[in-house]
Image (spheres, rainbow, N blue to C red):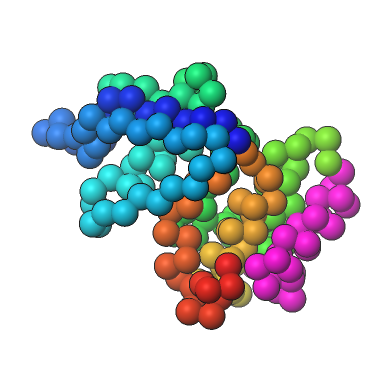
């Protein structure tokens, strides 16, 4: 995992009529291998900062770099678990996970990706639901599939945006 440098980052949503910043002058250095948590009240910009780190948005000012290279969009080197369920509704749980495995490593065969997907679903207690579609799963079950999908990418950086919010206390503690 590489070092992350966030320097003087400001972000205003493009549709903002006032141009008010959702983030203003954020600077942070995260060392390689470090685990950090962002804590703050609702609406303070935690999710916005994670979206910038994921490359889903670009800062209005300042810069974000990993190992000295600026983030220029999404990358399979960074996996993200969103606080809302983000599964493909037309794919089963196992195919949602296998899709991410193949996206992260295009040399993986379909059969190998399915085998690995089952292993990651097992890690989050969802292998018995592998053949179900998202609409057949509870919110907490969908979130566990999303966590398995992110873990299966084996990315250098794992970004988690309140990933356990939809989970019951038992699963939250186990994960």
In the displayed structure, 111 sits above or below 145; it is above
Is the residue 89 above or below the residue 171 in the image? above
Q: Residue 19 in the image: state x and y as whole percent.
A: 15, 31
For residue 38, side relative to residue 70 (left or right): left
Which region of the structure is painted magenta? 109-133
Quarter occupied by residue 84: bottom left
Q: Is residue 82 left or right of residue 9?
A: right
Residue at 40%, 32% in the rendered image: 29
- In the image, residue 57 above or below residue 91: above
Residue 140 in the image: state x and y as whole percent: 52, 72
Pick whichever, 73 or 50, lies toward us.
Answer: 50
The residue positioned 68% from the left and 46% from the top of the image is 153
Figure quadrant of residue 156: top right
- Magenta span includes 120: yes
Magenta: main secondary structure equals: helix
Magenta stretch: residue 142 in it? no
72 or 155: nearer the viewer: 155
Point 23% across, 57% down: residue:
41
Task: Work out whether residue 31 or residue 7 is closer to the camera in this orientation and state it.
Answer: 31
Q: Position of residue 128 (x, y in %)?
A: 74, 76
In this picture, residue 62 sits left or right of residue 142: left
**Residue farthest top in this picture:** 69
Q: Quadrant of the C terminus?
A: bottom right
Q: Residue at x 86, y 50 (%)?
A: 112
């Amino acid at each position: 995992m590489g070092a992350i440098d966030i320097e003087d980052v400001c972000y205003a949503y493009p549709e903002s009529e006032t141009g008010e910043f959702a983030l203003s002058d954020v600077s942070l250095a995260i060392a390689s291998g470090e685990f950090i948590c962002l804590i703050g009240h609702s609406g303070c910009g935690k999710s916005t900062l994670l979206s910038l780190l994921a490359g889903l948005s670009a800062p209005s000012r300042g810069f974000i770099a990993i190992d000295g290279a600026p983030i220029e969009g999404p990358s399979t080197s960074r996996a993200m678990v969103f606080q809302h369920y983000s599964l493909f509704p037309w794919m089963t749980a196992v195919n949602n996970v296998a899709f991410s495995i193949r996206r992260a490593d295009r040399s993986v065969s379909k059969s190998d990706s399915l085998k690995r997907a089952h292993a990651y679903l097992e890690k989050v207690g969802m292998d018995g639901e592998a053949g179900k579609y998202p609409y057949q799963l509870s919110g907490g079950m969908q979130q566990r599939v999303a966590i398995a999908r992110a873990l299966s990418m084996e990315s250098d950086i794992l970004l988690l945006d309140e990933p356990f919010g939809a989970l019951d206390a038992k699963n939250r503690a186990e994960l």
